[in-house]
Amino acid sequence: MSATIATSQRPGGLCAPHALRSLLATSIPRQYVHKTAQSEVLLTGWFPLGPDRFRVTARWPAGHSFYGPVYGHHDPLLIAETVRQAVPLLSHAAYDVPFGHRQTWHTFRYAADPAALAATGAPAEVEMDITCSDVVRRGSRLVSVHLHVELSADGARLGTVETGFANLAPAVYRRLRGPYADIDEAVRRAVPLAPPVPPRQVARTDFADVVLSPTNDPHRTQLRVDRAHPALFDHPVDHAPGMLLLEAARQATHAVAHPRAVIPTGMDVLFAQYVEFDAPCWIQAEALADGADDGAGAGSGERAGSGAGRVRVRAVQNGVPAFTALVTTAPVSLPAAAGRTAGLFIPRQSAGRTW
């Protein structure tokens, strides 16, 4: 079916969606992007450019407790998280979707210029010009929409995003999810947390940030669903969130490329159904050679020995594909000393995380 982007209830004292018609500020209120911690909000403002066209601004921190710089580049998944936050913001503020409705992903695709991702040690000012199309309403309520996003960082073109999502009213979501809509029951049935693969294999430095667990098959890992992770599980949910699946695709791609240093400059993703807590989810990853059928009509294949290429990732649960991603990578040149250390990231403080 899809993966839920998030949901949030509007507490007393928060302005109604129609009151946030446009805003340029230091930060969007966390409820509009479905975050519990204000420090996790990347968006700084928004305003309309025309019918179904908007500009949304964001600030990427120089260092982030989870989406920190990788191999001297901003984490490409900041693109996904920034757009993810824009989805509920525009739903509530521009299209009057009530709080408590859920935005669920169907498709997500990004392509980024690796040069524009280069980290400078300072925060990056990001702008997104968003065009909404295929806007479907039922009465006055937004049902679904497609977003085309043009991104820039510090004035330089960064890349593009295409994504489609649906808005689900609480009653619709409960009917769709059935017994799985009960968060407490979903958590009670959850499989135990599996041990992580070595962080270096997936371009991580902290075991707690690894979302893959090893198996006897080098091309297959188990998804680690750590519901205590403060970034991936900012608030309770009844299934594996979309950002966890994107992170699994990214880490699986690094594992395929290891020990080569690469960054994922693009992903083409389909969310086919929810990934539940009560059964193992297997992550299958394989590098695609030149001319291989990727099933998604993407671009060039891997160039032998260059570190560039494509990796196909699938998440399978109960024998059914729940998520597929075609990941495009670009090689990264590292100083010899850096390649021999765990310093894959710009160092972060392990204490005092700003979740």
Image: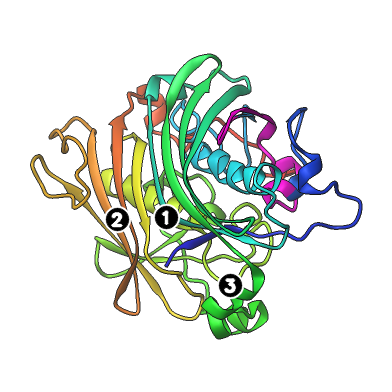
Residue with the most extreme right position: 13
Q: Are marks 2 and 3 in contact (CB under 8 Å)?
A: no
Q: Quadrant of the N terminus?
A: bottom left
Nearest to the observer: residue 220 or residue 48? 48
Nearest to the observer: residue 20 or residue 248? 20
Q: Amino acid at mark 1?
A: Ala
Q: Which mark is residue 313?
A: 2
Q: Which mark is residue 248?
A: 1
User: Would you call the spot at circle 1 few (<14 residues within 10 Å), some (14-19), or many (20 or more)?
Assistant: many
Q: Are marks 1 and 2 in contact (CB under 8 Å)?
A: yes
Q: Quadrant of residue 45?
A: top right
Mark 3 and mark 1 lie on one chain; the one further toward the N terminus is 3
The residue range painted magenta reads 32-54
Would you say residue 271 is visible in this rendering?
Answer: yes
Q: Secondary structure at mark 3?
A: helix
Where residue 67 appears, x then y in whole percent? 56, 40
Q: Amino acid at mark 2?
A: Val
